[in-house]
Image (tube, rainbow, N blue to C red):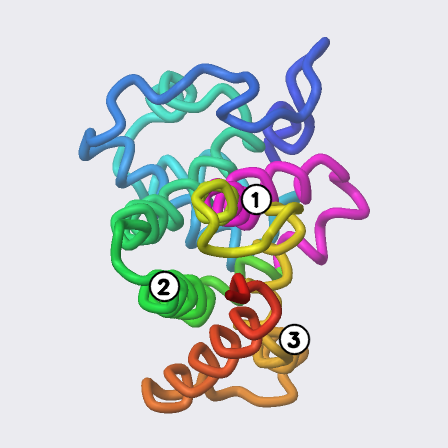
Amino acid sequence: MDHDLTEPRPGEALRSPSSGGRPPASAGSAKQDAIIEAAAEVFLEQGFGSANMDEIARRAGVSKATVYSHFDSKPALFGAIVQHRCQRTMSAMLAEMSDQPVAGTLTAVGRQFLDVLMMPGSLPLYRVVLAEAPRFPELGRIFYEAGPDRCAVALAQYLADQHARGVLHVPEARWAAEQFLSAVLGQIHIRMLLMVTGEAPGPEERTRYVAAAVSTFLDGCQRRA
């Protein structure tokens, strides 16, 4: 096991890429993408604590020094995996937050959110965090800030704007954003995390879940004439 990657380097705390660590030299580089994909495989197979940087470097087809030149710690690399997986979804969510009617925006955002959580690899990544967080408490924070929190922040900003424009009544936008995203998930996510069901809902079922969440949310937040 690589001790320097299982724990922070001497004098360092666990930290996310956004709050510390060397940022990636070139976000779109083929080497960086290869490292992230290889690390995701190793983390999912071996867990965070047991993941070996030599194995990550081997699978990525680069040297260990090259991995360190992009990510100065294992936590930073894990955070980059989460950001990488959420980046496209976040971009799509922000694109949907336009001047179209609120119901249409919430429907598009809810569907994007649900789809990313149902993507192959998303649930195993959650399980890694849940299993390793007691040993590496900051791992949960890194995961939360890089993924779920960013979604909630973006939606809260949109809802606050709609409140200011008099379209919705959401004086506590962050709370409202969390309520909406939770309504979209229902208990689908927890059932799949616990292996109560092994099959993700299909497109039609997802559409129904999102439509119900949007309807319930707007019933409570729509401005009344």
Quarter of the image that includes the N terminus = top right
The disc placed on residue 27 is none
Within the image, what quadrant is residue 120 found in? Answer: bottom left
- Between disc 1 and disc 3, the foreground one is 1
- The x and y percentages for residue 167 are 45, 54
CB under 8 Å between callouts 2 and 3?
no
Q: Which of 150 and 26 is in front in this view?
A: 150
- Between disc 2 and disc 3, the foreground one is 2
Q: Which residue is located at x 58 percent, y 89 percent?
A: 197
Q: Which residue is located at x 64 percent, y 46 percent?
A: 171
Magenta stretch in the rendered image: 128-157
Crowding near pointer 3: few (<14 within 10 Å), some, many (20+)? few
Within the image, what quadrant is residue 10 found in? Answer: top right
- The x and y percentages for residue 130 are 70, 57
Q: Main secondary structure of the magenta part?
A: helix
Q: Please state which amino acid type lies under the numbered disc 2.
A: Gln
Residue identifier under label 1: 149
Q: Please state which amino acid type lies under the numbered disc 3.
A: Ile
